[in-house]
């Protein structure tokens, strides 16, 4: 397999599915799957840096994930907390800009602070921008965007007005959306932004996702013929 990849996606968005199944298969609690999933996030960020991907968005907690047990939710918050603390300097060394999509108001105060601190520290980097979608829902993003526009006095809006009011206003729309574990759903991810994204559903469970799977995904993307509704 040649290591040269042409036609790279600028923005990859990932639905990290299969953590629970990964854990259950091993007789472990679900949060062990999420913990192993964090290692897959680290591998993926390294792969993005290696292959020159500019934007990567991870769906870490959806507006629907509040339906899970308190134990699982607290476990995910704890992983995020540990992850931000552990990688504080790594992001700076690797020149990775950290951002989030979603509404962080309901999150624990210390976690919000850790996230805002790391965003402040990394805000000038542009080698790779990593976005964590947390308490994020695609419909909620659209509703919040429209309400923002209404509050600014708009009474008629265009597509680009909406695009510029979404949480993703500062980043390009995803070129490539990967959902692991073989499930073929969008699950209220970047609904408006995905209008022309290429979709890919590898069978691998998220905690097992590694550089080999990443590279395979890039090769799949490379073979896609993006027409954006036109003819080529
Ligand atoms: C989907 O798998 C995964 C989630 C809902 C949570 C993902 C969260 C993390 C990997 C940790 C977040 C931490 C950081 C650092 C961003 P699932 O639980 O729905 O799996 P299943 O379908 O097999 O049950």
Image: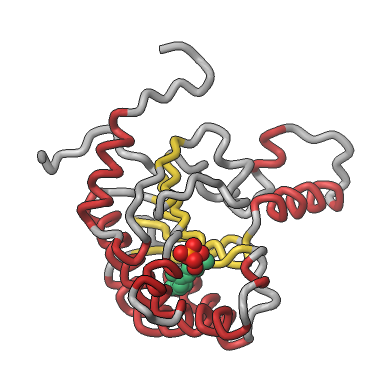
**Which residue does the image show at 40% across and 53% down from the upper left?**
180
Residue 174 x, y percent position in the rendering: 48, 43
- 43 horizontally vs 63: left or right: left
Q: Is residue 60 visible?
A: no
Residue 24 point in image, percent of width and height = 41, 73
Residue drawn at (25%, 59%), measured in percent from left and top? 210
Instruction: Point out the image quarter for the C terminus.
Output: top left
- Residue 189 located left or right of residue 41: right
Could you say where residue 108 lies in the image, as x and y percent from the top left?
63, 85
Asked whether 155 or 230 is in front, the reply is: 230
The answer to whether residue 158 shows anywhere in this view is: yes
Relative horizontal placement of residue 169, taking residue 50 as reference (left or right): right
Q: Closest to the observer: 223 or 146? A: 223
Q: Nearer the viewer, residue 231 or 37?
A: 37
**143 left or right of 208?**
right
Q: Quadrant of residue 7?
A: top left
Q: Residue placed at 45% from the left, 70% from the top? A: 20
Q: Position of residue 219 (x, y in %)?
A: 25, 38
Please tell me whether residue 64 is drawn above or below residue 92 in the rendered image.
above
| Outermost residue to the top | 231
Quadrant housing residue 192: top right
């Amino acid at each position: 397999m040649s290591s040269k990849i042409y036609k790279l996606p600028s923005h990859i968005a990932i639905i990290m599915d299969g953590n629970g199944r990964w854990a259950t298969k091993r007789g472990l609690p679900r949060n062990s799957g999420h913990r192993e999933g964090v290692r897959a996030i680290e591998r993926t960020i390294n792969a993005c840096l290696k292959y020159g991907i500019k934007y990567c968005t991870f769906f870490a907690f959806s507006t629907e994930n509040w339906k899970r047990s308190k134990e699982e939710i607290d476990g995910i918050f704890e992983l995020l907390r540990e992850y931000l603390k552990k990688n504080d300097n790594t992001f700076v060394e690797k020149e990775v800009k950290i951002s989030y999509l979603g509404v962080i108001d309901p999150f624990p105060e210390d976690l919000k602070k850790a996230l805002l601190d790391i965003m402040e520290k990394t805000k000038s980097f542009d080698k790779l921008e990593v976005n964590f979608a947390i308490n994020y829902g695609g419909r909620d993003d659209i509703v919040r965007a429209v309400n923002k526009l209404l509050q600014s006095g708009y009474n008629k809006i265009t597509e680009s007005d909406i695009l510029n009011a979404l949480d993703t206003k500062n980043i390009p729309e995803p070129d490539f959306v990967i959902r692991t574990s073989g499930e073929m759903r969008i699950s209220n991810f970047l609904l408006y932004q995905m209008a022309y994204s290429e979709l890919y559903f590898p069978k691998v469970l998220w905690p097992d996702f590694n550089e080999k799977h990443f590279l395979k995904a890039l090769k799949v993307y490379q073979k896609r013929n993006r027409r954006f509704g036109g003819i080529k």
